Image (tube, helix red, strand yellow):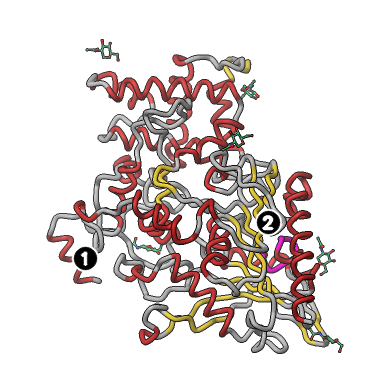
Amino acid sequence: MRLRFSIIGLLGFTIGAGALLPDGRSHANLPPTSTIPKLDGAALFSDKIRNGTVLPPYDTVYHFDQLIDHNNPSLGTFKQRFWHTYEFYEPGGPIVFMTPGEVNAEGYTGYLSNSTINGLIAQQEKGAVVLLEHRFFGLSNPYPDLSGTSMSVHTIQQSIEDIDYFARNVELPMPNGKSLDPDNAAWIMTGGSYPGALTSYTMVNKPGLIWAGYASSGPVQVMENFWVYFEPIRKNMPQNCSADVVAVIAHLDQVFSSTNTSAKQAIKDTFGMGSVQHDDDFLGALRNDLWAWQELQPTSGPGARFYNFCDALEVKNGMNAPVSGWGLDHALAAWGKHWRSGLASLCGRATDEQCFDSYAISAPNISIDQPYRSWNWILCNEFGFSQSGPPATSPVPAIVSHLVVPEYDIRQCVSMYPDVFTTSTAPDFAANTARTNQNYGGWNVKVNRLYFSNARRDTWKEGSVSAEAVNVSSTDSMPVYLSEGFHASDLLVRIAAANPSVAGAQREGLLAIKRWMEEWKQQRK
Ligand SMILES: *[C@@H]1O[C@H](CO)[C@@H](O)[C@H](O)[C@H]1NC(C)=O
Ligand SMILES: *[C@@H]1O[C@H](CO)[C@@H](O)[C@H](O)[C@H]1NC(C)=O
Ligand SMILES: *[C@@H]1O[C@H](CO)[C@@H](O)[C@H](O)[C@H]1NC(C)=O
Ligand SMILES: *[C@@H]1O[C@H](CO)[C@@H](O)[C@H](O)[C@H]1NC(C)=O
Ligand SMILES: *[C@@H]1O[C@H](CO)[C@@H](O)[C@H](O)[C@H]1NC(C)=O
Ligand SMILES: *[C@@H]1O[C@H](CO)[C@@H](O)[C@H](O)[C@H]1NC(C)=O
């Protein structure tokens, strides 16, 4: 690796890691990951005794010898981390299995407890709970770095094979833990966000492995341009705020499509980004105020950062704007001022260039445990999901510039993984996403005993089976529930306690699981 870096250096790349923003992204035009809410297990654990044995705390780490490459077992194994509890288990009960997905799983061991849907299922069905760290996240790495070459074994199929191989070979740290594979116990897979989709994909791809599934906010249908990510925001944010954002973006689209460089410069200056050279870096960065939508408060929706943004645009001299907003002139100036005041917390000690310039290529930092890097790899190769503006032909009022296009993200794939992509071998998002939908079913998923829980105010809704493009209907074998919640909000008991509609999603899922476990018991007789 060191050798490759010095060669890159000779070719004129900047040597170094590339500055990290305070939130861990390598620059401000990389979408934040949409993970499930963190939940610390240590804080939730109290001493529990099961048949005379004191149970280990939730944050006790176990290791499984996982195959590096399921297509080539001779390459050997790596240590994949997992966490486990059998506090509710009785013989005959199911194994409730979850991966927290695109994160270091250490912060998520609370998902073993009955503060989450996993624990509620385990409690109801007298099951055990297992949490498996996804390959290439946290400390579960087939290879000691995150180079593009190492990540050749970072695919959806490899992670499905991980689940299969784990379920069939693990010795769970509990009584009879060697004999609880899917032939002897019902495995129930749960997951939120990407792992919600992975629950569906696994059931499509591995019949007979997962008895029943609970998929929360899973964007099963991947797409090249996922501009509809912003639609639940536009439809659910204060109307005066969306009216003004639409007015500003329409104006920016017009100016930045023109050749009037002084007008463009004046606008960049308004946002304190006069030194940002590339127009799409400037226009794309403004998405950060919208991405704040997914920073959820503990129980009730978008956090302060999103509403501070709308207040900055809509409150003038102590007065709220009417539904139609204040109009372009005020909104543009007010957004610029608000943006300038947030620059320091967005960029930290990064210079403007480091913070915003996605064209300046530096040798990437390939250390392990960088979730953005591992997640973006999946986007580049299989998911696309470019959070761009709507296509020029769309009649929908844009809150992201039409000039932010998927090619922008495709180009970044080339600069993030220069050892595998070049400008002429850049990933083809259209082909990649078509293949993923073909392989794992997308919206056309048809399996037995899979519960889909989606949410109206979730930014990923339009990739889910509840997307307006399809409205997949609910059936007994594949119930679909649409709550008033947010991204994967039904995974947590505390959110359900504050939102009856989210509680409904949990209740419906628990009822379906109860029914399916009855079926399993019937079948075993
Ligand atoms: C690379 O990233 C790792 C993980 O975030 C970090 O600990 C390390 O300091 C970074 N290396 C450099 C040279 O910045
Ligand atoms: C605990 O002990 C009871 C009574 O001996 C037994 O019925 C039950 O299966 C045991 N539970 C576990 C998890 O071993
Ligand atoms: C969680 O389990 C504990 C026992 O360990 C119980 O006291 C509590 O009521 C359970 N919580 C829920 C939400 O069922
Ligand atoms: C360019 O835009 C500025 C406003 O920023 C305007 O004053 C000027 O007339 C425009 N120039 C042309 C050639 O349209
Ligand atoms: C207008 O904006 C204010 C401040 O953000 C907000 O509290 C209010 O709900 C908005 N009203 C409408 C009708 O959108
Ligand atoms: C799905 O439902 C929404 C809301 O009721 C509706 O606007 C949309 O047209 C429906 N889509 C299809 C494909 O039927």
Coordinates of residue 123 in the picture (x, y in percent): 79, 69
Q: Is residue 40 magenta?
A: no
- Quadrant (top left, top right, bottom left, bottom right) of the N terminus: bottom left
> Which residue lies at the image location 43% right of the left edge and 84% below the top edge?
77
In this view, 448 is above or below 463: below
Tell me the kind of residue under disc 1.
Answer: Phe
Q: Quadrant of residue 180?
A: bottom right
Q: Earlier in the sequence, mark 2 or mark 1?
A: 1
> Which residue lies at the image location 29% right of the left edge and 69% below the top edge?
149
Few, some or many residues within 10 Å of mark 1 (<14, 14–19, 20+) = some
**The residue tagged with tag 1: helix, strand or loop?**
helix
Q: Which mark is residue 251?
A: none
Q: Is residue 87 visible in this depiction of the protein?
A: no
Q: Quadrant of residue 282?
A: top left
Q: Is residue 112 magenta?
A: yes
Q: Is residue 88 left or right of residue 129?
A: right
Residue highlighted by disc 1: 5
> Which residue lies at the image location 77% right of the left edge and 45% below the top edge?
498
Residue highlighted by disc 2: 491
State the extent of the magenta-drawn residues as a range.
Answer: 111-117
Coordinates of residue 476 in the picture (x, y in percent): 72, 56
Q: Nearer the viewer, residue 429 or 484?
A: 429
Tell me the kind of residue under disc 2.
Answer: Leu
